[in-house]
Amino acid sequence: MKTLLILRHAKSSWKDDSLPDEERPLKKRGRRQATAMGELLAREGLLPDGVICSTAERTRQTLQLVAEAAGYTGEVHYTAQLYYTDLVTYLTVLRGLPNRYDRVLLVGHNPEVEELVAHLVGDTYPMPPATLAWLELPITAWSELNPATRGRLVERWTPPDEEE
């Protein structure tokens, strides 16, 4: 059994419209959200064995704050494949993970993370910024993950809605 933690990046800023989309940073609210989700991972005893994260600035910042709050110091793999892509690519990236990881945290973007959760559990769940979904997958190796794989949503957490 493998565990997949799927985290949508925290609330990002549109303040500087001269920045390319991939370079948009987090808002203050997003930084608070990411810290809260890192604290949640620590509190729930869900530190991952490995992390895979999009290369976009907002996902990198989200992960940094989550890791600091959770006390995570393990391996992180950044990949541009998780930015502006599709469900098939997300599944392909997951299939390539080392099998030594039993619990993986994936930090990505919508609509792909919402589609990934829906595909893997067979039901749709909203994934607003900084939402974390905990899935159990009936596989013993990441390479076994395929379009027919159906797991179980154990829990889904959304950060408190905060004002700027």
Image (spheres, rainbow, N blue to C red):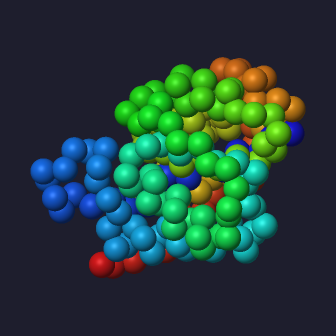
**19 in relation to 163, above or below:** above
Residue 110, horizontal then vertical, whole percent: 43, 43
Q: In this rendered view, identify the residue nearer to me: 16 or 77.
A: 77
Q: How many marks?
A: 0
Q: Residue furthest left?
A: 18
Residue 53, image x, y percentages? 53, 45
Q: Nearer the viewer, residue 91 or 133?
A: 91
Q: Residue furthest bottom?
A: 163
Q: For the point 60% across and 64% down, which residue is it? A: 67
Quarter that holds the N terminus: top right
- Quarter occupied by residue 70: bottom right
Query: Residue 125 or 87: which is nearer the viewer?
Result: 87
x 49%, y 52%: residue: 8
Q: Is residue 146 above or below residue 43?
A: above
Residue shown at the point (68%, 26%) measured from the top left: 95
- Examine the rendering and report whether any part of residue 139 can be seen: no
Residue 4 image position (x, y, % from top left): 70, 45
Q: Is residue 19 left or right of residue 61?
A: left
20 relative to 161, above or below: above
In this rendering, does residue 93 appear at all?
yes
Identity of the residue drawn at 30% across and 78% down: 164
The percent coordinates of residue 20 (x first, y second) are 22, 44
Q: Is residue 71 above or below residue 47?
A: below
